[in-house]
Image: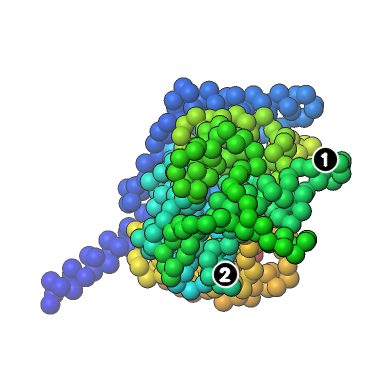
């Protein structure tokens, strides 16, 4: 009995020591991360980054704009974590990040995140919104969770993006065995008992080409500035929809049948058959293969600049909070943007649509690493010309994801206990439902609402993550911080991924001075609640 009691005491002491070690030393060996810069040091990679940087610098010089200074490394690390995983970094990761030399750690940090399942799961969810929307779809016919899991697997293995898109457009089979077919299944029309060709034409052009060609669904679309000029004919849209006219859906199986596509003329009230055709660059479409295979090959052809430009524009928006162009989807092909768009698009196409490389390129650019503030006034011109990092409101899942992660000193990832991961999943789902989902328009400018603020201030979930319970970071910091200043600094790192300013530190240190036990834990919990409800918590900057 004595031996067992001694063993128990040793285990407890070791656990407490390990927890304290994860809070305050410069580096921890526990679950060590490796910040390997990988391909970011290659000559061809750096050449593309320099070309992008020079394009922006030339534009700033031409318009007489002084850019904001570079942001601190921790601020950039926070941006990357929010963009790629949907939450702030954990304290465990921050301690190890700080241990690496400046000038080397950011490239390695981006690589670290791309190897993490948090990235593939989060990015898959964001991309699925663009592909199929946010609705759950018809039961059994569309397997949303299976589709998202397939997307995550593709991203985790860095499957070429063009191959992913080809599978979504052209795949056949069961929606469980061939999860890519859920892209087709999500467009199921219960009235016609098959996928809706027009809905699929809209989704293909919007998600993969960045085009809103559906304005020609019922009539020719004319240029608002020159009404004599037709931009898209109705036949352009309907010929594109015809690629899906033979697609059949039997229970859970997607296949291709026979016959021609007949569309309903909603103006004249008649029905017309129409053959397949693409709205531009028909020479890029192969002659062989099924109709959907030919369409998939045309969409992802390296010479189809619309595909690579649309992908760069979307990924840029996911990392910055707004796209390089004025919008994610444009009614025309000729919308001009910064020179960086075509530079990155050309590199993306020439490297077999390597999504990881594209993300690393964007993360390595000067514009991504600029501060959002400066010693001088940040003007509209800075915002328009990308001369300062744009402020953007966090999405609902980013807010609650950050709250949950900040309440834990350990990284919450695939290695976490099943209970921890399950709790996070249901907490996020409940919070996003109550907070208000941003729907599938990821980049619409959003403003905070009174109900959202009340949910943050009075909601049980946020309050519970700040509370002085043993498993929460606030309680652990209160127990193990060597002094009040270290406690305040650690809390700021957990929540904001930065250290407090002198004024902030002095304010909270004074609140903690002389407190012990429950009083000290309650003061740390109150501090956490204040930080959670600050404006800084709700924005990417």
Q: Is 535 situated above or below 390?
A: below
Q: Is 242 situated above or below 209?
A: below
Q: Which mark is residue 229?
A: 1
**In this picture, residue 300 sits left or right of residue 320:** left
**In this picture, residue 375 sits left or right of residue 183:** right
- Give residue 418's quadrant in the image: bottom left
- Please name the residue that numbered disc 2 is placed on: 192
Q: Residue at x 82, y 40 (%)?
A: 229
Please tell me which residue lies in front, 54 or 537: 54
Task: Provide residue 290's location: percent of width, then percent of height.
Answer: 46, 47
**Label 1: few (<14), some or many (≥20) within 10 Å?**
few
Q: Residue at x 44, y 61 (%)?
A: 254
Circles 2 and 1, Cβ within 8 Å, touching? The answer is no
Q: Is 358 situated above or below 291?
A: above
Task: Provide residue 214's location: percent of width, then percent of height.
Answer: 69, 53
Please tell me which residue lies in front, 225 or 279: 279
State the count of labels. Answer: 2
Please tell me which residue lies in front, 41 or 335: 335
**Can residue 485 be seen?**
no
Q: Is 65 situated above or below 478?
A: above
**In this picture, residue 22 sits left or right of residue 44:** left
């Amino acid at each position: 009995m004595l031996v067992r009691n001694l063993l128990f005491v040793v285990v407890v002491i070791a656990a407490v020591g390990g927890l304290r070690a994860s809070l305050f030393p410069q580096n921890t060996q526990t679950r060590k991360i490796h910040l390997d810069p990988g391909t970011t040091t290659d000559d061809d990679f750096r050449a593309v980054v320099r070309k992008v940087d020079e394009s922006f610098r030339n534009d700033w010089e031409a318009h007489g704009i002084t850019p904001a200074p570079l942001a601190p490394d921790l601020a950039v690390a926070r941006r990357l974590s929010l963009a790629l995983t949907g939450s702030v970094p954990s304290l465990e990761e921050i301690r190890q990040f700080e241990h690496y030399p400046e000038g080397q750690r950011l490239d390695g940090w981006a690589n670290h995140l791309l190897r993490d399942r948090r990235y593939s799961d989060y990015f898959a969810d964001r991309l699925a919104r663009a592909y199929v929307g946010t609705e759950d779809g018809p039961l059994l016919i569309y397997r949303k969770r299976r589709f998202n899991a397939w997307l995550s697997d593709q991203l985790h293995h860095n499957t070429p993006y063009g191959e992913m898109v080809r599978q979504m457009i052209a795949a056949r089979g069961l929606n469980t065995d061939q999860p890519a077919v859920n892209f087709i299944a999500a467009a199921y029309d219960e009235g016609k008992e098959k996928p809706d060709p027009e809905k699929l034409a809209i989704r293909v052009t919007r998600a993969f080409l960045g085009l809103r060609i559906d304005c020609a669904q019922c009539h020719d679309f004319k240029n608002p500035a020159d009404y004599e000029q037709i931009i898209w004919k109705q036949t352009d849209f309907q010929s594109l929809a015809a690629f899906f006219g033979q697609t059949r859906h039997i229970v859970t199986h997607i296949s291709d049948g026979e016959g021609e596509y007949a569309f309903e003329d909603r103006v004249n009230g008649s029905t017309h058959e129409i053959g397949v055709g693409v709205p531009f660059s028909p020479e890029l479409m192969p002659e062989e293969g099924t109709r959907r295979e030919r369409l998939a090959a045309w969409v992802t052809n390296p010479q189809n600049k619309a595909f690579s430009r649309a992908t760069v524009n979307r990924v840029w928006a996911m990392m910055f909070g707004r796209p390089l162009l004025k919008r994610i989807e444009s009614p025309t092909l000729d919308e001009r943007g910064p020179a960086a768009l075509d530079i990155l698009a050309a590199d993306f196409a020439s490297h077999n649509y390597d999504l990881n490389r594209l993300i690393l390129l964007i993360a390595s650019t000067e514009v991504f690493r600029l501060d959002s503030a400066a010693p001088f006034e940040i003007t509209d011109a800075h915002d328009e010309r990308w001369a300062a990092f744009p402020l953007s409101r966090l999405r609902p899942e980013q807010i609650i994801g950050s709250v949950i992660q900040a309440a834990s000193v350990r990284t919450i990832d695939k290695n976490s206990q099943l209970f921890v991961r399950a709790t996070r999943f249901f907490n996020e789902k409940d919070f996003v439902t109550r907070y208000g989902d941003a729907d599938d328009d990821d980049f619409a400018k959003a403003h905070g609402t009174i109900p959202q603020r009340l949910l943050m201030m009075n909601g049980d979930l946020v309050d519970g993550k700040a509370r002085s319970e043993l498993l929460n970071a606030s309680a652990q910091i209160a127990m193990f911080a060597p002094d009040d200043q270290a406690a305040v600094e650690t809390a700021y790192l957990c929540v904001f991924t930065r250290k407090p300013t002198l004024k902030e530190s002095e304010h909270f240190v004074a609140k903690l001075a002389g407190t012990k036990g429950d009083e000290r834990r309650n003061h740390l919990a109150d501090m956490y609640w204040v930080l959670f409800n600050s404006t800084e918590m709700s924005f990417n900057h």
